[in-house]
Amino acid sequence: MSGFVFSEKPIEIASGDGVFVHDTNGTEYLDFGASYACTPVGHCHPEVVDAATSQLEDLLYVQASYPHAARTALYERLAEVAPVDVGKVWLCNSGTEANEAALKFARSATGREKIVATTQGFHGRTMGALATTWKDKYKKPFGPLIDGVEFVPYGDGEAMREAVDDETAGVILEPLQGEGGINPVPTEYLQTVRVATATSGAALILDEIQTGLGRTGSLWAADRHDVVPDILTTAKGLGSGLPIGATLCRDWIAADAGDHGSTFSGGPVVSAAAVATLDVIKREGLPAHAAEVGSYLRGEVERRLGDDVRDVRGDGLMIGIEVKRGSNRLLRDLAIEHRILALPAGRTVLRLLPPLTVEREHADRVVDALVEVMA
Ligand code: PLP
């Protein structure tokens, strides 16, 4: 018997502590994948564990229509740190649900149907979010998905200007694509998208599910590009590994968001964990730390591996190394021979998304190992 997993690994992880995880034999691994960016403050950060544990003892769940201190604190914390003037926050359990809500809200607030998405984009696996995801491999067996989605090449401002019209409800994109291969875009492009959506009255939805919470060197990637979206989605590391997603909406979206709900919307335990996670990120200055260590790591990869790889790209601690052959063997050798866990992004890109608490010494260990596995 097995569950539905993308690709089962031959290592059984039993515990985690900061930037390390341990398997059932007690072997320690340096975690440069963070289970797809789910542990920004490191594994089992004591403040997050304490917040969740003490909440567990009081109340596991109460429906969102009853105010609860932990949930209210999370609404407030998210509004404080958001790059948008938040009218309302929708809490859910995953990234795909956060995007699903964003697409629904964009449609109901504008009364329009068309959604513009980008090539190589990834927004989740439920029917709406999946329809805005680019690669066929995720979509093929599940159609028909929702209608009304048009794709434009990621990074092409002119194509975006042409696609966004007075029938467009929203544009959804990642400010730096993750799953699609770690593809950054210039600020000018994102600002073009902002102007095109504002001019047509469409909602700009920034999917910061992978880029957010300090990963790219600022709390949100939007901050560095000086772009204010109408809707911002976050998930992954928000609960330090407990399942939570959030859709942050400006007033004009919130005012006409329609009837949307979920039984599990911002439970007390995940909310307490998320508040603690946000507090640690802020207090420990993790976005700036990610910028500093990320730029060192990227520089070292370029210096020591520049001739052996096709490209190195990304911001902060969201780094993609495009290799000349497939990344599978490299990932296996890193894990088995060097006890370092990392991720793929497509077939030829090795993706590094460590906890934001990693230090230069950890970056050195990864670069040393990469030099060996690529030799
Ligand atoms: N959006 C982006 C940018 C993602 O990277 C992901 C997951 O990888 C999602 C959405 C979907 O999130 P989840 O897997 O929590 O549904």
Image (cartoon, helix red, strand yellow):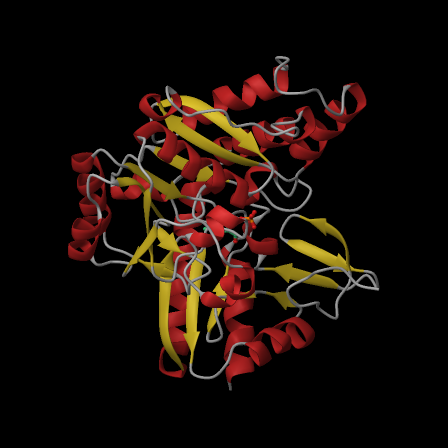
Foreground of the two, 307 or 256: 256
Drawn side of residue 374 relative to residue 256, left or right: right
- Measured as percent of width and height from the top left, residue 296 is found at 40, 59
Q: Residue at x 45, y 49 (%)?
A: 146
The answer to whether residue 276 is above or below residue 12 is above
Q: Where the N terminus falls, by quadrant?
A: bottom right
Q: How many numbered callouts?
A: 0
Foreground of the two, 11 or 95: 95
Q: Find the residue positioned furthest to the bottom.
A: 375
Drawn side of residue 250 relative to residue 40, left or right: left
Drawn side of residue 303 relative to residue 24, left or right: left
- Measured as percent of width and height from the top left, residue 131 is found at 44, 53
Q: Residue at x 70, y 20 (%)?
A: 62
Q: Find the residue positioned furthest to the top.
A: 67
Foreground of the two, 371 or 251: 251
- Measured as percent of width and height from the top left, residue 6 is found at 64, 64
Q: Residue at x 50, y 38 (%)?
A: 98
- Residue 213 seen: no
- Measured as percent of width and height from the top left, residue 114 is found at 31, 44
Q: Residue at x 78, y 62 (%)?
A: 12
The answer to whether residue 28 is above or below residue 216 is below
- Residue 88 seen: yes
